[in-house]
Each structure stands twice: as structure tokens, then as C-alpha cells.
Image: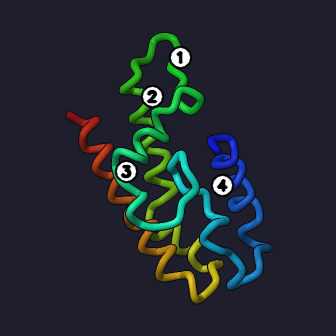
Amino acid sequence: MLAAYDAKWLILRTTADILPPDSLRFHQIPWPILEPAHCVEQMTKGAIRRFLEHPSRLSVPRGKTREEVLRWVVKRELLRWHPDKFHSQVLSKAKPDQRSWISEVAAAVTRALTEIMAELAH
């Protein structure tokens, strides 16, 4: 699940220009939780934080604290899930009948990431 997340983002980034319009489906989007995504209720701060803090995702190099590394990871995810960027690169490629659902779930991801970042700032 964790390796698939990064691999799916890499595919989305590298094929965004050639991905046919109206072709992307909800299940093709890499959602930042440990279990398969089905609904907005899954995108909780706790579920996303567990995903981000999973030992296979969060390795702490020497000289850095766990919090420093987690802040960097959350910042990177916030950039990835930024509404403008997400809408132009991902949502614009989504099937029309799934766009509002995808947008709602992506907004929940962004809210959770913002909350996590705020907690890490204190």
C-alpha cells in the first residue's frame, strides 16, 4: 500500500499531459491512508497521520528529529494536495460523474494535513 502510493503519484505526475480527459477514477488516485479508500469519512487526521508516520514511510536520518522529518513529509503532502494543484493536475482528468466525490475527499485530506501541520508547529 505504501509503495503503491508513491508509485501512483509518480505515474500521475509523469502522465498528466497524456492522460485522456475524463478518464481518472476515484480508486486510481493515491489516497494517504493505510487501507483502500472508499469514502470521505476515512480521511481523518488520525488515519492520515498513521499513514505518514508508518515506519516504512518515515525514516529519521541522523541529526534530525522525528518531528522535523514529519514536518517535511506533511509539507510535501500539503503541496501535493493543494487544491489548485490537485484540481488542475488530477481533478481535471477525473470522470465527470466522480469529480464532486473526488473533490470532497481531497478537501478532507487537505484539512487533515493542515491540522497535522498546525499540531507540529506547536
Disc number at residue 9? Answer: 4
Give the mark, 1 or 3, whose residue is nearer the N terminus: 1
| Helix, strand or loop for disc 1 | loop
**Residue type highlighted by circle 2:** Val
Disc number at residue 113? Answer: 3
Give the mark, 3 or 2, whose residue is nearer the N terminus: 2
Which residue appears at 51% of the width and 73% of the height? 102
| Helix, strand or loop for disc 2 | helix
Give the mark, 2 or 4, whose residue is nearer the N terminus: 4
Look at the numbered discs 4 and 1 and tell me whether their residues touch, using CB distance below 8 Å: no
Look at the numbered discs 1 and 2 and tell me whether their residues touch, using CB distance below 8 Å: yes
Residue at mark 1? 61
**Residue type highlighted by circle 1:** Pro
Q: Residue 29 placed where, x, y %?
A: 62, 63
Give the mark toward the camera: 1 or 3. 3
Residue at mark 2? 69
Which residue appears at 44% of the width and 17% of the height? 64
Give the mark, 3 or 4, whose residue is nearer the N terminus: 4
